[in-house]
Amino acid sequence: MMQIQAEDPCCVGVDVGGTFTDLVLLQKGRIRTAKVLSTQSPEQGVLAALAQAGIPGSGEESITLTRFCHGMTVATNALLERKGVPTLLLTTAGFGDLLWLARQHRPHLYDLTPIETDPVVMAVEEVN
C-alpha cells in the first residue's frame, strides 16, 4: 500500500475489539481502512493498523493528525456484560437518575409496573 502523504493532514478513527482492531483514515477526501488482529496490548494493535493503513511509524517522517478518535469495544462489552470491577457514574448535580430514566424505551410507556433491569453502574455520584 502507498504511504500517506505527510504534508496532508488526516483524521483517524480506531476501534479496539476483542478479535480485531479496525481503523479508518480520511485524507484529502480519500478513505483508507485497515483491519488487524487485536493483541494483548491494545496499543500494539493500533500501531499495526496504522502501519497497515500506510501511516509512517515513529521515524523522521511524521504526519499531521487533525483528529484521532478512539473506541474500545472491549471496554463497552465488559461494561454491558457486567464483567470486571464495579463501575461508578460521575455526573453533574441533578443528573444522577439519568440511567434510571434512560430513554423510556419500553413496550407500554405508561405501565406503572415496568420490567426493571439491573443497573449498568453500581453507584452514582453527583458533583457541582
Image (cartoon, rainbow, N blue to C red):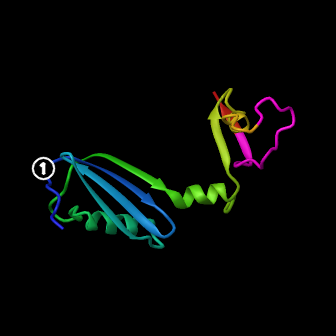
Q: Is residue 15 above or below residue 8?
A: below
Residue under the image location 26 percent in, 63 percent down: 53
The residue at the point 26 percent across, 49 percent down is 26
Task: Work out which quarter of the rendered image holds the N terminus and state it.
Answer: bottom left
Residue 106 quadrant: top right
As drawn, is 24 to the left or to the right of 55? right
* Element type where label 1 sits in the image: loop
Q: Quadrant of residue 111?
A: top right
Q: Which residue is mark 1?
A: 7
Quadrant of residue 47 in the image?
bottom left
| Amino acid type of the residue tagged 1 in the rendering | Glu
Residue 115 spot, x, y in % from top left: 82, 43
**What type of secondary structure mainly makes up the magenta span?**
loop
**Would you say 43 lies left or right of 97 here?**
left
| Vertical side of 49 occupied by 79: above or below | above
Report the residue that reaches farthest toward the right.
Answer: 113
For the C terminus, the image quarter is top right
Residue 109 colored magenta? yes
Residue 111, magenta (yes or no): yes
Q: Which span of residues is magenta-colored?
A: 108-124
**Residue 91 rendering spot, x and y as whole percentages:** 63, 35
